[in-house]
Amino acid sequence: MLEQRRHQRIRFGNLPRVSIGFGGAIGEGLIENLSLSGLMVRTDMPLEISHNIGCEFRVFGSPMIDVPATVVSRVGDLFGVRFQTGPINQILIDDAISSALASGNASILAVRELGGKKIMRITGGLGNPLRNDFMHALTRVGVDEIDLEGVTVVDQAGLALCSVACNRHGVKLGAQSPCFAEAWKQALAVPGEIEKMETPGL
C-alpha cells in the first residue's frame, strides 16, 4: 500500500456518475476513484479490455469532462480505464480533483516512508468513506504517524478513526490542518467523547 503511483487516486464519499459510450451503446456507471491518468468505474455495461470507450462526467459541480479512454482492467463489474487526454482535459480533470479535495467531497490516503517511519498522509475529507483504507494501513501496512495537514473537512467518523489509531495502535498525530486541530481539540475537551465515537469492529 506504500504509495508509488505517478498519479494519486482520489476516493469519493458520494460516487459521481459517468456516462459511457461503448460499441454504439450509451450507459452509466459510478466513479469509484479518479486520477489524472484514469478512473475506476462500476458499471453493468459489457466493456471489454483493450477497447476504447467515451467517458463524460462532472465532479461535484465541475465543468463537464468529455474524454476518450481505453479499458485496461476488470474485476467483476469494476473496470480500470486509462484516459487518452489532451492538455485541456488534463487541466479540467486536475481542477475538478483539486476542488473536490478542497471541499472535502474527495480524499487521498497515502502511506510513505520518511526517515525510517511510515507516515500516513490524508488530504481532503476525513470520514467514513476512508475507513477501509485507513484501517488497512493501520493493521496491514503499519503506521507510525498521521499527517493531517491536508485535511479540509473532518467528521465524527474521522475523529473516531484517529482515536483508534492513537489509543489502540500507538500512532502519533503529526501536522494538522486548522479544521482538524479545532475538531480534535473540541473532542478532547469532553471527557470520554472520543472513546464514545469509536464503534465496535474498528
Image (cartoon, rainbow, N blue to C red):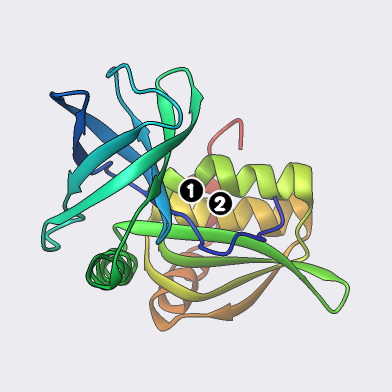
Q: Residue 202's quadrant in the figure?
A: top right
Q: Is residue 87 visible?
A: yes
Residue at image position (32%, 60%) is 85
Few, some or many residues within 10 Å of mark 2 (<14, 14–19, 20+): many
Estimate the x, y position of residue 178 in percent, counting from the top left: 42, 83
Q: How many marks?
A: 2
Estimate the x, y position of residue 148 in percent, counting from the top left: 54, 72
Few, some or many residues within 10 Å of mark 1 (<14, 14–19, 20+): many
Q: Is residue 153 left or right of residue 18?
A: right
Q: Residue 116's quadrant in the figure?
A: bottom right
If you read the primary sequence from the N terminus, does the residue marked by circle 2 or circle 1 appear first? 1
For this orientation, the residue located farthest to the right is 116
Q: For marks 2 and 1, give the CA distance.
A: 9 Å
Residue at image position (42%, 57%) is 35
Q: Is residue 126 visible?
A: no
Estimate the x, y position of residue 123 in percent, counting from the top left: 47, 68
Q: Residue 21's quadrant in the figure?
A: top left
**Residue that carries the numbered disc 2 in the rendered image:** 161
**Residue that carries the numbered disc 1 in the rendered image:** 130
Q: Is residue 194 left or right of residue 171?
A: left
Cβ atoms at labels 2 and 1 below 8 Å apart: yes
Dot 1 falls on a residue whose secondary structure is helix
Q: Which mark is residue 146?
A: none
Give the mark toward the camera: 2 or 1: 1
Q: Is residue 115 left or right of residue 130?
A: right
Task: Residue type at mark 2: give it.
Answer: Leu
Estimate the x, y position of residue 136 in percent, counting from the top left: 66, 42
